Image (cartoon, rainbow, N blue to C red):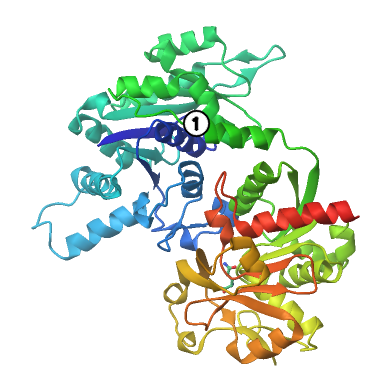
Amino acid sequence: MKYIAVTGGVLSGLGKGIAASSIGRLLKSRGFKVTSIKIDPYLNVDAGTMNPYQHGEVFVLADGGEVDLDLGNYERFLDEALASDHNITTGKVYHTVISKEREGKYLGKTVQIIPHITDEIKRRIRKVARESGADITIIEVGGTVGDIESMPFLEALRQMHREEGGHVNFLFIHTTLVPMLGTVGEFKTKPTQHSVRELREIGITPDVILGRSEKPLPKAIKRKISHFCDVPERAVISAQDVDSIYEVPLNFERQGLTDYILERMEMNSREEDLAGWERFVKNLKSAKGEVEIAIVGKYTGLKDSYISHKEALAHCTAETKVNVKIRWLEAEDLEKEGDADEFLKGVHGVVIPGGFGNRGIEGKMMAIRYARENKIPFLGICLGFQLATIEFSRNVLGMDGANSTEFDENTPYPVIDLLPEQRGVKDMGGTMRLGEQKVIIQKGSKAYSLYKRTEISERHRHRYEVNPDFIDKIEKGGLKFTGKDVEGIRMEIGELDEHPYFVATQFHPEFKSRPMKPAPVYLGLVKAAIEYKKSL
Ligand code: GLN
């Protein structure tokens, strides 16, 4: 069992998650089984209750875990399914320790950060590593070195490094910023030096330094960092800005990072297979022309809120070799202005992503109506699926005031509602339908032509459902539910016959879209958008 810990210095938001994911991909390309752990030093137990506007998207795992979006990056880069316990938070750690204390398990001892909290951190890391059966576990520590919150985690990692037998089994990779100053763009290494010193003060010596910069680090700068930070020059890696995050592994590989890591950890490559990834990046970069797709949401100010949608569309670009330009639209603006045409004119496709609460729902429904009536390719996801059902009920079937009981408890037509067994349950967390569930697809449907199978498994995060009392009426009107859960009670996919591409899903296909394996309903959307553009 080997471990690689990735820490960050100078400032947050340097793309540490992408760096860690890229290293994972590179090691996987050498034939090793790799898994990853994200440490989030905040006190929340998980990301389920966090506002996407502050933290970006809540990513949903197969087991229903609601986790930090970095786990989405890991899954996309590694193409391995992770579980909830791969996200360790201060909240989870303290929760266990305090419960144990209440149960009297510490036998009267004083319960302290060292050793009790640090032991619990180590126990969780080792458990995940062991149970995943991975050769190498990559651990990313959120935040930056020096944050009060991350101290117990860094201390635990420092201890693990020794207990596991030093750098052969436990490597430290430190990500820093190397800013460029002045008109000539002089590289400044001082922040890196300070950050490494801070790391050393807590007893951690980095084995590799990843210098984030605008441009590639020149040899002389690498040498300087090597001297001041006491790592060999080969271990100073330039992590310059690139057009696409998917290029990062290739950039590291070119600089010999994988070879260096394997050498230092005394491992031999079992194979070398980056060809698929290289082809994927090449396709991405050589894409010609573009279609424009609108994402109408309510957190569009922070693009990270919809990161999995953005990546799913990128996966489609590599597949179709046509660029997808995203037009970010704030649903509330549409609602206020009242003119969908003004906002959506010229787009070749519309996506309505998931969401909670009623802010912006009328604006989203205006966009759905516009796409439906003008035969513009449309993909609705989760809340987007529910709103497509409501919009259809209102504007095609004449059910005035149709709504979801999430937004209007007294609606005359509750076409979206809680199922009877969920009503009156107070614990909101308990009623959420989460994680991967089977979906049965009707043969001959559009959905079937996309997935090419009758049984799929997709990820969920919702509470409300299409109300069974209205299904008949809606289907007779022309919105067909071609995907259902195994019991046939929950509607999972809706599609319109009289439309080139109007598909909506109760599940979240974006969470399972991967490089080289784009989510079928996204690929369908982009292909339809390409056709639509040609027809204009
Ligand atoms: N708010 C809706 C529900 O709870 C949709 C959730 C979502 O889009 N993730 O069912």
Could one spot residue 346 in this view of the protein? no
Residue count near mark 1 (Cα–Cα under 10 Å), binned few <14, some 14–19, many ≥20: some
Identify which residue is drawn at 72% across, 87% down.
476
> Residue 501: horizontal and vertical position, in percent?
75, 65
Does the closest atom of ligand 1 sit within 8 Å of the Cβ of label 1? no
- Quadrant in which ligand 1 is drawn: bottom right
Question: Does residue 133 lie above or below 96 as drawn?
Answer: above
* SS for dot 1: loop
User: In which quadrant of the rendered image does the N terminus lie?
Assistant: top left
> Residue 267: horizontal and vertical position, in percent?
29, 25
- The reply, left or right, for residue 468 in relation to residue 67 is right
Question: Does residue 59 lie above or below 324 as drawn?
Answer: below
Identify which residue is drawn at 40% across, 15% down.
229
Question: Does residue 458 lie above or below 284 as drawn?
Answer: below
> Residue 457: horizontal and vertical position, in percent?
49, 65
Question: Does residue 128 lie above or below 457 as drawn?
Answer: above
**Residue 387, picture quadrant:** bottom right
User: In which quadrant of the rendered image does the C terminus lie?
Assistant: bottom right
Identify which residue is drawn at 62% across, 67% down.
448
At label 1, the amino acid type is: Leu
Q: Foreground residue, 341 or 484?
A: 484
Please give the residue where the numbered disc 1 appears in the rendered image.
274
Identify which residue is drawn at 12% across, 60% down.
105
- The reply, left or right, for residue 506 in relation to residue 324 is left
> Residue 298: horizontal and vertical position, in percent?
68, 61
